[in-house]
Amino acid sequence: MLKKAWYLYYDGFKNMPRWGRTLWLIIIIKLSIMFLVFKLWLMPNFLNSQYDSAEEKSDHVFKELTTKP
Amino acid sequence: MLLDLTTTTLVEWSRWQFAMTAIYHYMFVPLTLGLALMLAIMETMWVKTGDKSWLNATKFWMKLFGINFAIGVATGLILEFQFGTNWSNYSWFVGDIFGAPLAIEGIIAFFLESTFVAVMFFGWNKVSKRFHLVSTWMVFVGANISALWILVANAWMQNPVGMEFNPITARNEMDNFWAILFSPTAISKFTHTVTSAYTLSACFVVGVSSWFILKKRNLEFARKSIMLASVFGLISIILTIYTGDSSAQDVTKTQPMKFAAMEGLNEGGRGAAFTVIGLPVNDPSLPTDKMKKMEYAIHVPKMLSFLGYHDFNAYIPGIQNILDGYTSQSGVTYPSLEQRMANGRTAIDALKTYKQAVKEENQILADSTLQVFKANYSDFGYGYLNSPYDAIPHVPLVFYSFRIMVGLGMLFVLLFAVSLWYAKKRKFEKFKLIPYLALFCVPMAYIASQCGWIVAEVGRQPWVVQDLMPTNVAVTKIASNWVITTFWMFAILFTILLIAELKIMFHQIKKGPETDN
Ligand code: HEM
């Protein structure tokens, strides 16, 4: 069963037409930009990057909520 | 990365960034939802009839589905990153409600899609006909399940139900899963979004097939596709209108300010008229420029009341009525927005005192302030507004977007009815106007869908969570030039993706289906 599944993917990728390969290239570039550039570098989770514990995070948001913008 | 410029610039740019990425994301999503269903139907026709031309049609549209799916999938990830980076107060405020179900759904949909998409593309001649067909249906199910929970989350923001705010952690916690899943807002949001996505996909198939007709190529394939997509499209657009009508009724009850803005209605009343079209302009006699006078308006008497409540004499509040306070059709009395702002400020102060009292272990004070907080929590967000006029969204944008969406909906009824009629009589290609109309409707379906989202999202401003949290509280206080920089980075990335999609797609369309009888 597992061998069959592996073969399905293996054969599918091997016999893929040119446009399919281009698509996969786009997918890989897209996902690497999203995860490596944006997620890790440009768009960190603000609360996680500033505070360690849930209590600190909650205190921060609490302060934001009780101070008028 | 800490605060520089004004909060207004920051909020505006954070909103622009979210809007831009959401608009691009939604350029890829609806075709995935609807084309998957049409593929499943086409393949079923092949398995049932053994007619090879259905197989060719399935393979051709599957190719276009694959291109759209591969390029579009995961564009929504950026929105998720933005929640954590730009809207951290909001994410914390609602986090517990959506975290776990979204994660479970993500995993289920990912496995459904990734395994069955592989069988769908690679499995021809390797798995049995039936298993292949089941896989195609499962791709449709997976894609539509992916849409479900995110739309339920959106609906919750428009109409927050089934939760309790925890004043210690400053988070809303789910206390009734079913109330969230089956709230009327969630039902109308999900059904209207998916049926409108099916309509868009039908426009796409009829439009692209019309191109073949105009080029006098692959005629049998094009006729078959037009026939199927016209029936599919006609059913979808009827369902889109039906669910749009339910959405309008829901908005009337849960977001009356949005409904008033959709109509540019200042003074409401019983038997309110529907404005077919008009020109919203500034008028110095109105208390604020956010309210508009409707020039050159064409009205249908009592129609708005009917749209809102299916009752020609129902009461519909206008913007001024909401500012002043009113009693709704169902008999609930809402105080003026000045009063709701005062209630909101009371809730915010009570929350602050409560936290302090808990810290100092003053149980009596904690209990009494908690009571005050709970009594005023439904107006919590109004406490952050500087003026009642802050509660009015951008009227012209919402007014026009609603009319464009509905107007195009009517055009699609005409398109599918006419194309079905002439396709059945085998006269589709005789009247050149019809294939040209079909081609024109492809971009129009995207415009209608984007307008729908503008109605839903601009119409609910200033709220991120209706009545509880406005955008300027939800936003993370980071440097706005940082937000501007990432805005342009996303704009460039998404534009490249869109160009790549269009290029590959046009190339494959020009090549046409594999065989033609
Ligand atoms: C013809 C009658 C239609 C009516 C009465 C209607 C009504 C509505 C209403 C009231 C909303 C706002 C819902 C909210 O704010 O929660 C909405 C949103 C939306 N509409 Fe329509 N609509 C119609 C046609 C269409 C068409 C033809 C399309 C696209 C092909 C479309 C796509 C959308 C989308 C994508 C949204 C945003 C998602 C949502 O809020 O459900 N609508 N529509």
Image (cartoon, coloured by chain):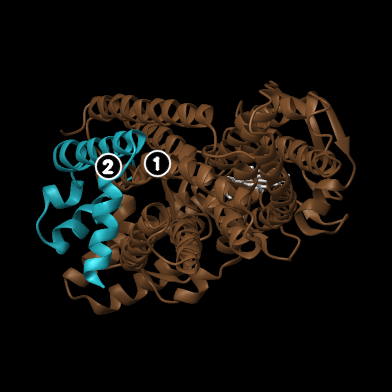
For ligand 1, tell me if the residue under mark 2 lies within 8 Å. Answer: no
Judging from the image, mark 1 belongs to the subunit labelled B
Colour of chain B in the rendered structure image: brown
Q: Is residue B319 visible?
A: no
Q: Secondary structure at mark 2?
A: loop
Whole-angstrom CA distance, mark 2 to mark 1, is: 27 Å
> Is B248 placed left or right of B128 in the picture?
right
**Relative to B276, does residue B42 appear above or below in the rendering?**
below
Q: Position of residue B445 (x, y in %)?
A: 63, 36
Write down which chain is painted cyan: A
Q: Position of residue B479 (x, y in %)?
A: 22, 30
| Residue type beneath disc 2 | Thr
Residue at the image point whose x is 68% and y is 65% from the top: B332
Judging from the image, mark 2 belongs to the subunit labelled B
Residue farthest along the left direction in this orientation: A52
Q: Is residue B450 visible?
A: yes
The residue that mark 1 highlights is B72
| Residue type beneath disc 1 | Gly
Corner quadrant of residue A52: bottom left
> Is B183 placed left or right of B142 in the picture?
right
Q: Position of residue B123 (x, y in %)?
A: 39, 58
CB under 8 Å between callouts 2 and 1? Answer: no
> Which numbered tag is attached to residue B476?
2
- Of residues B88 and B317, the one drawn nearer to the viewer in this rendering: B88
Residue at the image point whose x is 29% and y is 78% from the top: B364
* Number of marks drawn: 2
Are the residues flagged by discs 2 and 1 from a single subunit? yes
Residue at the image point whose x is 23% and y is 40% from the top: A28
Q: Earlier in the sequence, mark 2 or mark 1?
A: 1
Within 10 Å of the Cα at label 2, are there few (<14), some (14-19), or many (20+) other Cα atoms?
many
> Is A60 placed left or right of B23 in the picture?
left
